């Protein structure tokens, strides 16, 4: 597949991938919509600024998710936090119609380490293969598998305790 690197082709990339990138950030920030939007915007600005350097060694989607991951990492480093993201609170936005399941999932995601949350989101929510998650996160496939396995166990345990089957 040939990809013409023009402004219009980049606009198509944004339209095609913006929801997935935002979903990634919503999971990593435990539902903070404003922060997720800001991080997604930063991701696409970085991608746009580097559009002409994209060598097509991976899919555009994988390339964008790698930029998104780096954007989130930079954000976290900028906060100078020394503990896990787990200390972030879960927002109670009036706009989200207070969907109990959505809040329970964010609460469950809060139990995961940052790496577990990232791997679970990329593999189970976004549908990336273990190999693709490893490439995006620069972890080994076995490490990715371990994070996903532990993350799924924690999510399952929490959601069962909340009455979900």
Image: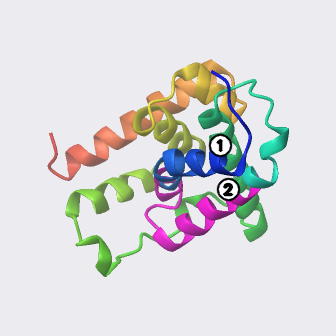
Image mark count: 2
Image position, residue 32 (x, y; %):
47, 69
User: In the visual, does 80 lie left or right of 125?
Assistant: right
Looking at this view, name the residue that lies furthest to the right: 53
| SS for callout 1 | helix
Q: Quick one: label 1 or label 2, which is nearer the N terminus? A: 2
Instruction: Tell me where the magenta segment starts and ends, as one range.
Output: 23-46
Q: Is residue 103 above or below residue 8?
A: below
Q: Assign the magenta stretch its main secondary structure.
A: helix
Report the disc number at residue 43: 2
Image position, residue 23 (x, y; %):
46, 52
Image position, residue 161 (x, y; %):
22, 49
Report the residue marked by disc 1. Answer: 64
* x 62%, y 20%: residue: 141
- The answer to whether one can see residue 82 in this image is no
- The answer to whether one can see residue 65 in this image is yes
User: In the visual, does 102 lie left or right of 70?
Assistant: left
Q: Quadrant of the C terminus?
A: top left
Please tell me how crowded label 1 is: few (under 14), some (14-19), or many (20+) other residues with Cα within 10 Å. many
Q: CA distance from mark 1 to mark 2?
A: 7 Å
Image position, residue 144 (x, y; %):
58, 27
């Amino acid at each position: 597949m040939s990809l013409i690197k023009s402004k219009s082709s980049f606009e198509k990339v944004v339209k095609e991938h913006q929801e997935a990138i935002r979903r990634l950030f919503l999971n990593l920030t435990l539902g903070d919509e404003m922060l997720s939007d800001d991080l997604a915007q930063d991701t696409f600005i970085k991608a746009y600024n580097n559009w002409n350097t994209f060598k097509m060694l991976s899919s555009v989607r994988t390339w964008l998710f790698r930029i998104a991951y780096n954007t989130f990492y930079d954000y976290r480093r900028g906060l100078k936090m020394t503990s896990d993201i787990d200390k972030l609170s879960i927002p109670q936005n009036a706009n989200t119609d207070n969907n109990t399941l959505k809040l329970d999932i964010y609460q469950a995601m809060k139990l995961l380490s940052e790496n577990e949350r990232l791997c679970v989101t990329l593999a189970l929510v976004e549908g990336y293969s273990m190999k693709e998650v490893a490439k995006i996160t620069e972890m080994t496939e076995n490490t990715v598998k371990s994070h996903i396995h532990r993350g799924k166990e924690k999510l399952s345990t929490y959601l069962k305790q909340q009455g979900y089957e």
